[in-house]
Image: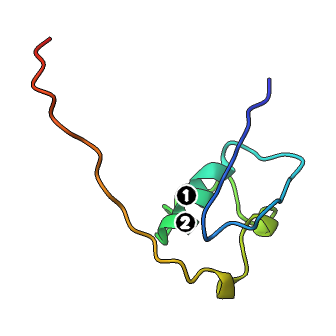
Amino acid sequence: MQAIFMARGPLFSKSIQIDSLNNVDIYHIACHILKIKPNRYANAGSLANLTSLFAPIGNTSTQITFTSTNTTTGRSI
């Protein structure tokens, strides 16, 4: 069984395809995107084979903003 990983944004290179991606690497991708240090005990996975996914540092001038879409609807269950 295989899964599809798709990424888009200022940190990712455009039109890049890789042959495979290990599920354990997604944790390290998320840490890289969020600019947080991975847990030192999370030794499975690596970014070493995934450097082609990321855009060169000079191309990341787009500002990233987060907005909340959570709203209360007033429905009762």
* Residue at the image point whose x is 77% and y is 62% from the top: 50
Question: What x and y, as percent, mark residue 47?
Answer: 71, 64
In the image, 18 versus 76, the foreground residue is: 76
Question: What x and y, as percent, mark residue 65?
Answer: 39, 68
Question: In the rendered image of this protein, does residue 41 appear above or below residue 35?
Answer: above
**Disc 1 residue crowd, few under 14, some 14–19, many 20+, Cα 10 Å:** few
For numbered disc 2, what is the local secondary structure?
Answer: helix
In the image, 46 versus 19, the foreground residue is: 19
Circle 2/circle 1 CB separation < 8 Å: yes
Instruction: Pick out the residue farthest to the bottom.
Output: 58
Give, as a three-letter code, the residue at label 2. Answer: Ile
> Where is residue 3, by image quadrant?
top right
| Residue 42, disc | none
Query: In the image, 60: left or right of 34?
Result: right
Instruction: Pick out the residue farthest to the right.
Output: 19
Q: CA distance from mark 2 to mark 1?
A: 5 Å
* Residue at the image point whose x is 82% and y is 59% from the top: 15
**Disc 2 residue crowd, few under 14, some 14–19, many 20+, Cα 10 Å:** some
The colouring scheme, among rainbow, by chain, secondary structure or one colour, is rainbow
* Residue at the image point whose x is 70% and y is 60% from the top: 46
Question: What x and y, as percent, mark residue 42?
Answer: 56, 55
Query: In the image, 46: left or right of 64?
Result: right
Give, as a three-letter code, the residue at label 1. Answer: Ala
Of the 4 image quadrants, the one containing the N terminus is top right
Of the 4 image quadrants, the one containing the C terminus is top left
Q: Which residue is mark 1?
A: 30
For numbered disc 1, what is the local secondary structure?
Answer: helix
Q: Which residue is mark 2?
A: 33
